[in-house]
């Protein structure tokens, strides 16, 4: 772990789990880290560094999980294991005491402990093994859909939702919908070891998916995946899946749905009946238990729902913008970062630009291609004028000079398809008011209008060749006709 950079999402989970009372060893096991790594990150936030307890008994009990695995191998005896133990711990226990403690430990190792669920503590999630289906109304194709199940550990309040797949996007969206249904956030989320939740399943050190960690951090919720091949860890949701088959799947088995929304609406109706039904040997229903004892202890939902993030590394361009390649749209960044490599973190609704884990720009996402989203303060003072370019600005500017200039600029704006090129043409044309004078610019615009040509180049040629001073009507009247005569089409 010494050479591995710990992601920000993992550090936040360490702090969340520590705040919930989990020890360093448990946190290390759940997040796939070493105990020393967890200890070092917790020490950074705490002025008190706890001294690790040492002793013969602790070192012996740490050796017992190894003993349990080795005793299943042919020819391995307690005597051999005790010898290995004493080679590592010369001052360790005698063989008799070692065997006595080992027997007690083995007797308790496989005991199924009843865990008393606390209100607002855990939320278990999983997908059912069987699937429902929708029918494509245009083709008649039957499309199988996955069914997501969520249950709160204390009240048993259940949420069920159909989705197209078990992929990460659908899985995270289902969790968000479940939290919205509950109207609050539990302290811990317990998913199964499916690929959308865990990148690498392991009995001791599961590697949790980065986006799931990000979702947990967004809601202030710790993520503790169930251990691989340990059904007891998710017994609550496993039992609920069986109930869902009876109370959701069976009533819907003969109905045909032509959309996912119609199917989920039908599921929601049956779900309300399920959550309102009194529990066995109790008078209360799951909904009543939730309202009376659990809802008040859940964390409040954040103001904004979680959105799946995507990441992109780009270099800040010389115009103080970065490009989001998916949309071909440009967003401004403070000009002092020109030339630096930055990270764009974007969702369906917004984008953030980060440098060294610090956000340097934030924008609402705009999918319009070849457009610019610009914050004026991001640009150097000499460029802020350019950031205010728009058609109205140039039309008003031209109108202050003369109506004929306004008419010509309106034609330029109408004929160009790429805005930045159009605006540059307008600036070039209007700048002739200072370079050549107001009267010459008006005359040049009048002459160019007669050609039906609207661009900077024709105005430049008219003024440079002093054609604005000639009477183009008389020229056309006196001009002899021959093959070398240039007509208005020459300027187009």
Image: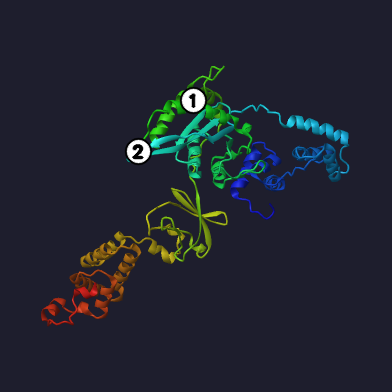
Q: In this view, does 194 lie to the left or right of 160?
A: right
Read off the residue under disc 1. Answer: 246
Q: Report whether residue 379 is seen.
A: yes
Residues 251 and 33: in front is 251
Q: Say which label, 1 or 2, has the lower sequence index.
A: 2
The mark lying in front, picked from 1 and 2, is 2
- Residue 259 position in % (x across, y down): 38, 37
Residue at the spot 66% in from the left edge and 44% down from the top edge: 205
Residues 395 and 320: in front is 320
Q: Point out which mark residue 431 bears.
A: none
Q: Point out which mark residue 140 bears.
A: 2
CA–CA distance in space, label 1 to label 2: 27 Å
Q: Please, what secondary structure does the residue beneath circle 2 have? A: loop
Q: Is residue 115 left or right of residue 72?
A: left
Q: Is residue 397 above or below residue 467?
A: above
Residue at the spot 17% in from the left edge and 81% down from the top edge: 485
Crowd tier of the residue under label 2, counting other residues whose Cα lies within 10 Å: few below 14, some 14–19, many 20 or above = few
Residues 387 and 98: in front is 98
Look at the numbered discs 1 and 2 and tell me whether their residues touch, using CB distance below 8 Å: no
Residue at the spot 21% in from the left edge and 72% down from the top edge: 448
The C terminus, quarter of image = bottom left
The part of the image, by quadrant, that contains residue 393 is bottom left
The part of the image, by quadrant, that contains residue 137 is top left
- Residue 176 position in % (x across, y down): 49, 38
Q: In this view, does 417 lie above or below 23?
A: below
């Amino acid at each position: 772990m010494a050479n591995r950079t710990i992601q920000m999402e993992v550090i936040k989970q360490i702090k969340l789990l520590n705040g919930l009372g989990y020890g360093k060893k448990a946190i290390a096991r759940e997040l796939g880290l070493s105990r020393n790594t967890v200890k070092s990150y917790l020490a950074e936030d705490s002025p008190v560094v706890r001294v690790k307890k040492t002793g013969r008994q602790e070192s012996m009990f740490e050796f017992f999980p190894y003993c349990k695995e080795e005793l299943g191998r042919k020819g391995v005896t307690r005597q051999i294991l005790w010898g290995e133990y004493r080679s590592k711990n010369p001052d360790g226990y005698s063989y008799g005491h070692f065997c006595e403690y080992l027997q007690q430990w083995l007797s308790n190792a496989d005991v199924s402990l009843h865990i008393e669920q606390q209100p607002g503590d855990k939320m278990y999630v999983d997908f059912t093994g069987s699937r429902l289906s929708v029918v494509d109304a245009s083709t008649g194709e039957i499309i199988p859909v996955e069914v997501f199940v969520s249950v709160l550990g204390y009240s048993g309040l259940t949420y069920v939702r159909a989705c197209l797949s078990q992929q990460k996007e659908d899985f995270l969206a289902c969790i968000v919908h479940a939290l919205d249904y509950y109207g609050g956030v539990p302290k811990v989320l317990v998913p199964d070891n499916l690929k959308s939740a865990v990148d690498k399943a392991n009995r001791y050190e599961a590697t949790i998916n980065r986006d799931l960690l990000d979702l947990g951090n967004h809601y202030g919720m710790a993520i503790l995946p169930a251990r691989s091949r340990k059904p007891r860890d998710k017994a609550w949701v496993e039992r609920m899946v069986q109930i869902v088959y009876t109370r959701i799947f069976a009533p819907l088995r003969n109905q045909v749905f032509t959309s996912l929304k119609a199917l989920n609406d039908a599921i929601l109706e049956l779900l309300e009946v399920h959550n309102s039904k009194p529990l066995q040997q109790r008078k209360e229903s799951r909904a009543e238990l939730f309202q009376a004892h659990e809802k008040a202890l859940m964390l409040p939902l954040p103001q904004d729902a979680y959105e799946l993030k995507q990441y992109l590394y780009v270099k800040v361009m010389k115009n103080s913008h970065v490009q989001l390649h998916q949309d071909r749209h440009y967003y401004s960044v403070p000009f002092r970062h020109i030339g630096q490599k930055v990270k764009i973190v974007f969702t369906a609704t917004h984008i953030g630009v980060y440098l060294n884990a610090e956000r340097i720009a934030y924008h609402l996402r705009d999918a319009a291609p070849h457009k610019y989203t610009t914050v004026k303060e991001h640009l150097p003072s000499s460029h802020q004028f350019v950031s205010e370019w728009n058609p109205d600005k140039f039309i008003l500017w031209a109108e202050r000079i003369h109506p004929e200039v306004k008419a010509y600029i309106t034609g330029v704006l109408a004929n160009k398809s790429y805005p930045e090129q159009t605006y540059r043409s307008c600036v070039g044309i209007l700048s002739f008011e200072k370079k050549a004078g107001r009267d010459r610019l008006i005359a040049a615009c009048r002459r160019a209008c007669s050609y039906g040509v609207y661009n900077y180049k024709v105005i430049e040629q008219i003024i440079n060749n002093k054609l604005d001073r000639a009477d183009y009507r008389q020229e056309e009247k006196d001009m002899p006709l021959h093959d070398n005569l240039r007509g208005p089409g020459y300027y187009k």
